[in-house]
Image (tube, rainbow, N blue to C red):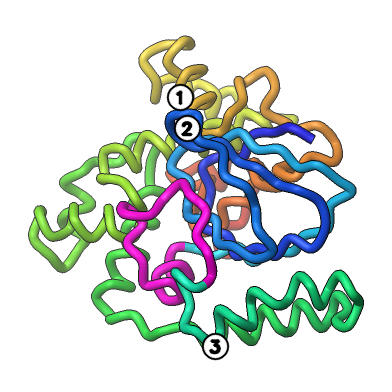
Amino acid sequence: MDDVLPAYSGQMVIFARGEGRMQFDDGQVAEASDAFFLAPLCQARNFSISGPATMFGVSLNFRGWAALTRLPVNECHDRFLQPDGVLEEQAAAKFSSLAAKWRDQSLDDEAVLEAMGDIVRRSLSKLPAQHLTVIDRTLEWLSSSFKPDLDDLYERLPYSKRQSQRLVAQFFGQSPVRLVRRYRAVRAATLLSLPELPAEIEAEIREAFYDQAHLIKEIRFFTGRTPKRLQPEAGSAVRDMLGPEGYGSVNLFGGGQDEQLGVDPLS
């Protein structure tokens, strides 16, 4: 199966059967191992899975990636990372052993799920309160508009402009300017994939881009798809990622669109 993974959060994955590959910069193709981390993606990436394949993964939101890995996203995005480069020795060894135990059925599905959850729980560190504030307020800012004002972000954060830029890159992988591009495209893609989209929202989406060519280029870069083929085919590994639930950290229906779509912003 060949597909494209949109710019997405970090993943913690075990691969019990099959083979997986992902193409990164300069044509580099990385091979999936029994256990690995996929660092957060800042753009869409081509991947392939040869099967039959059996895999299990944990999706890490921005708080989760920072607390579990303690790795700056701007220094380690868009790549596979081995367990011993992320986790402490005992946790890395346990994580690395799960695929083989799943294959030989010494662990069933439920036991694998519990083991993965235990590794995550034991490996989480406590983030400083002000760092949590940076993550949460940046997400609120991204949710506020297709084109949120940069000065508004700096006013929300308890740091200087330069420090805020550094911390946003550390937790999200990109500067605030590039982060706006990414989530504008992702929000547009998600909304345009809905079967019934009010004309007012569609107009708002198109006003957020210079023209139709710009909209298509940006959506393709960050999701790997064009507006005409936003919905992945049945069975695609990324089918849920382009839906509203796939980007739960960011309110894709922010900026007053909740009411127009009949979405409860508190749900």
Which residue corresponds to the image point at 79% horizontal and 72% vertical from the top-left? 100
Q: Which residue is mark 2?
A: 185
Above or below, 94 relative to 54: below
- Residue 97 versus residue 225 in the image, above or below: below
- Pointers 2 and 3 in contact (CB under 8 A)? no
Tell me which segment is drawn in magenta: 62-83
Residue at the spot 48% in from the left edge and 55% down from the top edge = 39
Q: For numbered disc 2, what is the local secondary structure?
A: helix
Kind of residue at badge 3: Gln
- Helix, strand, or loop for circle 1? helix
Residue that mark 3 sits on: 90
Name the one closer to the observer, 183 or 35: 35
Q: Quadrant of residue 50?
A: top right
What residue is disc 1 on?
A: 218
Asked whether residue 254 is in view, the answer is yes
Determine the image quadrant of residue 45.
top right
Tell me how far mark 3 sits from mark 1, CA to CA: 42 Å
The x and y percentages for residue 214 are 42, 15
Quadrant of the rendered structure where residue 196 is? Answer: top right
Q: Residue at x 34, y 80 (%)?
A: 127
Q: Check whether the beta carbons of the residues at disc 3 and disc 1 lie within 8 A of each other.
A: no
Quadrant location, the N terminus: top right
Q: Amino acid at mark 2?
A: Ala
Residue 267 in view (yes/no): no
Residues at marks 2 and 3, CA–CA distance in whole angstroms: 40 Å
